[in-house]
Image: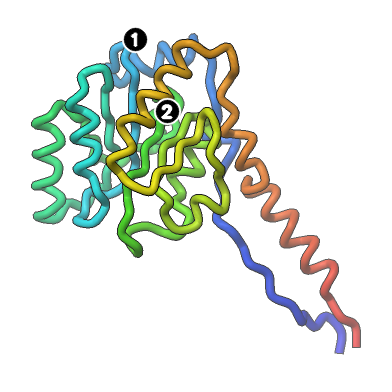
């Protein structure tokens, strides 16, 4: 029989690198005006739901430092616990956006750093899509050692991986200092190019092409 497949291929999480991309200063200025974000603010972004176990309280602690403007893009589905977390975040000045955003990539593009504070297993997929989107947008990233994150990202000047969420504020200070005083450009986008959907599709095609057995 021809065309029998006798192989297995692990398909990793992918990201749309055409949609999530870095932008220039002119476009960034326009987007900040659109979302009413002060042009000179250092914006910390998190994308994800507000359910119990996501360690959202860390973002509230970051917002206590008025040097940082924290934005959370949350699910449009709000439970009782989510509403409580939302109120606590907003009380500290966090901007919580819980409406559908067809142009989510714009929030990444006009932010300065992405923070993923979740520790508890099963509260997100093994490789959170938001981290791939942030890296594709060429944002500095601070993340816990959650799931498959350390398998894809390694510590660098622009990537801080913490084993304790209490380390996040110091990591953020380091990222902010690098952003303000370094001539070296952030390079997180280069770390995830292999996870673009085009590259994943090409890898699947190669796998199928190499493992079709004619009998």
Image position of 166 (left or right of 111): left
Q: Position of residue 132 (x, y in %)?
A: 51, 44
Which image quadrant for residue 47?
top left
Structural crowding at the residue carrying mark 2, measured as other residues with C-alpha within 10 Å and reported as few (<14), some (14–19) or many (≥20): many
The colouring scheme, among rainbow, by chain, secondary structure or one colour, is: rainbow
Q: Position of residue 45 (x, y in %)?
A: 34, 32
Image position of 47 (left or right of 52): right
What's the residue at 49%, 9% (across, down)?
26
Compared to 195, does 28 lie above or below?
above
Q: Position of residue 182 (x, y in %)?
A: 53, 13
Structural crowding at the residue carrying mark 1, measured as other residues with C-alpha within 10 Å and reported as few (<14), some (14–19) or many (≥20): few
Q: Nearer the viewer, mark 2 or mark 1?
A: 1
Q: Considering the numbered disc 2 on the image, is that residue within a helix, a strand or a loop? A: helix
| Mark identifier at residue 157 | none
Which image quadrant for residue 16?
top right
The answer to which of 98 and 89 lies nearer the viewer is 89
What's the residue at 27%, 48% (across, down)?
75
Which residue was labeled with disc 2?
106
Q: Are marks 2 and 1 in contact (CB under 8 Å)?
A: no
What's the residue at 26%, 23% (across, down)?
69
Q: Earlier in the sequence, mark 2 or mark 1?
A: 1
What's the residue at 33%, 28% (across, down)?
44
Q: Position of residue 196 (x, y in %)?
A: 63, 45
Name the quadrant of the N terminus.
Answer: bottom right
Name the quadrant of the C terminus.
Answer: bottom right
Which residue was labeled with disc 1?
40
Image position of 140 (left or right of 188): left
Q: Considering the numbered disc 1 on the image, is that residue within a helix, a strand or a loop? A: loop
Which image quadrant for residue 186?
top right
């Amino acid at each position: 029989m021809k065309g029998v497949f006798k192989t297995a291929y692990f398909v990793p999480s992918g990201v749309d690198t055409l949609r999530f991309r870095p932008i220039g200063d002119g476009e960034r200025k326009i987007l900040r005006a659109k979302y009413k974000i002060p042009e000179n603010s250092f914006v910390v972004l998190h994308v994800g739901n507000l359910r119990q176990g996501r360690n959202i309280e860390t973002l509230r602690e970051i917002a206590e430092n008025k040097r940082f403007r924290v934005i959370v893009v949350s699910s449009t589905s709000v439970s009782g616990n989510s509403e409580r977390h939302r109120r606590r975040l907003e009380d500290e000045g966090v901007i919580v956006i819980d409406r559908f955003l067809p142009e989510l990539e714009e929030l990444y593009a006009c932010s300065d750093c992405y923070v993923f504070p979740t520790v508890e297993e099963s509260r997100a997929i093994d490789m959170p899509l938001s981290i791939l989107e942030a890296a594709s947008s060429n944002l500095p990233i601070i993340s816990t050692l959650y799931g498959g994150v350390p398998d894809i990202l390694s510590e660098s000047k622009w990537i801080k991986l913490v084993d304790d969420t209490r380390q996040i504020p110091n990591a953020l200070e380091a990222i902010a200092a690098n952003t303000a005083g370094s001539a070296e450009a952030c390079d997180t986008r280069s770390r995830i190019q292999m996870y673009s959907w085009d590259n994943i599709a090409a890898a699947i095609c190669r796998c199928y092409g190499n493992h079709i057995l004619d009998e």
